[in-house]
Image (tube, grey):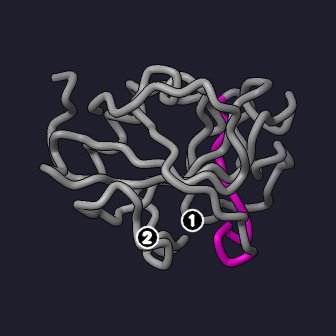
């Protein structure tokens, strides 16, 4: 991922952020903050955030908000700390309060420690629901790898 603009601003649910990866050329890609400062048990790490990353690309840094839908997720939902913002990989570009349609009806994550599927609050699910991610904290490096894989290109770190 390319460095855009570092920020220490507190995250809010509904924040839309831009990011750039060399594999996407001159286009910006986008994500959205779904939950912030999650408590232990609800997430793999206290204080982390639940985000969505979308497949939508634009030459403009502020996206067409209607294009950021749960049907266009680039990768399954991810848990992340504030490092991508602090390092400047994610840049908040607009805040729009979340509507029900902006959030998946049910989140699913595989918990590798307990070998079960859980929701975003750590509750055990009876079955896997797509899209299904991992109940683990991602770093900006593992996010970069996941984005590269979803785009079908070699990770920038290779």
Mark 2 or mark 1, whichever is nearer to me = 2
Among numbered discs 2 and 1, the one appearing first in the sequence: 2
Q: What's drawn in magenta, residue-wise?
A: 100-112
Q: Give the image location of residue 57, x and y in percent.
A: 29, 62
Q: Give the image location of residue 24, x and y in percent.
A: 18, 51
Residue 70's quadrant in the figure? bottom right
Count all numbered tags in the image, as a single digit: 2
Within 10 Å of disc 1 (Cα), the crowding (few <14, some 14-19, many 20+) is few
Residue 127's quadrant in the figure? bottom right
Name the residue tied to disc 1: 130
Q: Which residue lies at the image location 46% right of the left edge and 63% below the top edge?
A: 73
Q: Which residue lies at the image location 49% right of the left edge and 72% below the top edge?
A: 65
Name the residue tied to disc 2: 72
Residue 113: mark: none
Q: Magenta stretch containing residue 104, yes or no?
A: yes
Name the one closer to the observer, 26 or 50. Answer: 26
Name the one closer to the observer, 13 or 114. Answer: 13
Split into 4 quadrants, where in the image is the C terminus?
top left
Q: Judging from the image, what secondary structure is the residue with disc 2 in?
A: helix
**Horizontal placement of 83 versus 43: left or right?**
left
Q: Judging from the image, what secondary structure is the residue with disc 1 in?
A: loop
């Amino acid at each position: 991922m390319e460095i855009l603009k570092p920020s220490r601003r507190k995250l809010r649910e509904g924040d839309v952020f831009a990011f750039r990866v060399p594999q996407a050329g001159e286009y910006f890609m986008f994500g959205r903050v779904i939950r912030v400062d999650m408590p232990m048990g609800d997430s793999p790490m206290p204080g982390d955030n639940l985000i969505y990353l979308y497949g939508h690309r634009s030459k403009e840094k502020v996206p067409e908000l209607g294009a950021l839908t749960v049907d266009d997720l680039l990768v399954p939902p991810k848990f992340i700390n504030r490092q991508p913002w602090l390092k400047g990989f994610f840049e908040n570009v607009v805040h729009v309060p979340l509507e029900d349609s902006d959030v998946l009806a049910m989140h699913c994550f595989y918990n590798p420690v307990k070998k079960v599927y859980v929701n975003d609050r750590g509750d055990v699910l009876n079955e896997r629901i797509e899209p299904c991610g991992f109940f683990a904290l991602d770093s900006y490096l593992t996010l970069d790898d996941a984005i590269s894989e979803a785009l079908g290109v070699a990770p920038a770190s290779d």
